[in-house]
Image (tube, grey):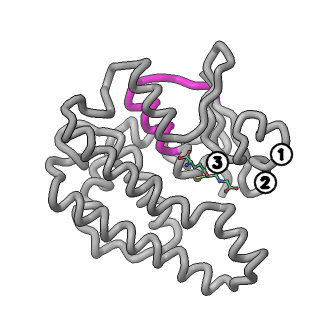
Amino acid sequence: MQLYSFFNSSTSYRVRIALALKGLEAGYHGVNLRAGEQRQAAHRELSPIGGVPVLVRDDGASLTQSLAIIDYLDGQYPQAPLLPREPLQRARVLEVAQLIACDIHPLNNVRVLGYLQRVLEVGPEEKGRWYAHWVAEGLAALEALLQRHGSGPYCFGDEPTLADCCLVPQVANAERMGCELSAYPRVMAVYDHCQAQAAFQRAAPGRQADFIQ
Ligand SMILES: N[C@@H](CCC(=O)N[C@@H](CS)C(=O)NCC(=O)O)C(=O)O
């Protein structure tokens, strides 16, 4: 398997966590989002929308969309399952994963922030406010969901799930962007617990081959 990734892409980070939790290795291809490599024709052959992550199997089959990739890995490599089988528990995990993947991340994606800046001519201060606003709204909802339905050191119990694969990169991004996080104690407790685990540490941006300061 080969993973097309960027060290501080949160969606790539989700997949790296899933791979590490399952003890899987994938060849690493850095796609430099800062240099716009995701928009080059060769990369669009793999990802028509121009993004990472992309997982390419040994037989050449390629997959985009971090949640689809993790679902594939979970089906193909059943060790350390990331999605519960019981329907309500499974839906709870997906509820958190999709809150992050559908309601928080897309609003602050590279191409969205770039459009705000280049086309709508939004200044850096307003761009920062946009970022902080959507992160705050999303993390408040995440905190409420985890307060209501979560338990244990991870989002849902004593073992990591897809929800944790999504939570950690989103909070890491928010931290990196200087967002205020003290209003989300349950989110931060899960984050701190995950950050202390070896698999999450292996997947961290600073440990990747394409890491740049
Ligand atoms: N929904 C997709 C989003 C993928 C995505 O947009 N990734 C970001 C990096 S976190 C990206 O490649 N952005 C490039 C751009 O917006 O130009 C997924 O979950 O995989």
Closer to the eye: label 1 or 2: 1
Q: Amino acid at mark 3?
A: Phe
- The tally of labels here is 3
Residue placed under numbered mark 1 in the picture:
40
Q: Amino acid at mark 2?
A: Gly
* Residue ID at (39%, 44%): 165
Ligand 1 within 8 Å of the CB at mark 2: yes
State the image coordinates of residue 88 (x, y, percent, origin top left): 19, 41
Quarter-wise, where is residue 183 in the image? Answer: bottom left
Counting from the top left corner in percent of width and height, residue 144 is at 23, 66
- Distance CA(mark 3)–CA(mark 1): 20 Å
Secondary structure type for disc 2: loop
Assess disc 2: are there few (<14), some (14-19) or many (≥20) residues with their C-alpha within 10 Å of its C-alpha. Answer: few
The residue under the point 42% across, 24% down is: 23
Segment tinted magenta in the rendering: 13-27
Q: Residues within 10 Å of mark 1 (few under 14, many from 20)?
A: few
Q: Earlier in the sequence, mark 3 or mark 2?
A: 2
Measured along the vertical axis of the image, is residue 82 above or below residue 145? above
Magenta span: predominant SS is: helix
Foreground pick, 185 / 208: 185
Up-down relation of residue 116 to residue 101 (above or below): below
Amino acid type assigned to the residue bearing label 1 in the image: Gln
Question: Would you name the residue on which mark 3 appears?
Answer: 211
From the viewer's perspective, is residue 113 above or below residue 105? below
Which numbered disc, 3 or 2, marks the residue closer to the eye?
Answer: 2
Disc 3 to disc 2, C-alpha distance: 16 Å
Residue at which label 2 appears: 36
Q: Are marks 1 and 2 in contact (CB under 8 Å)?
A: yes
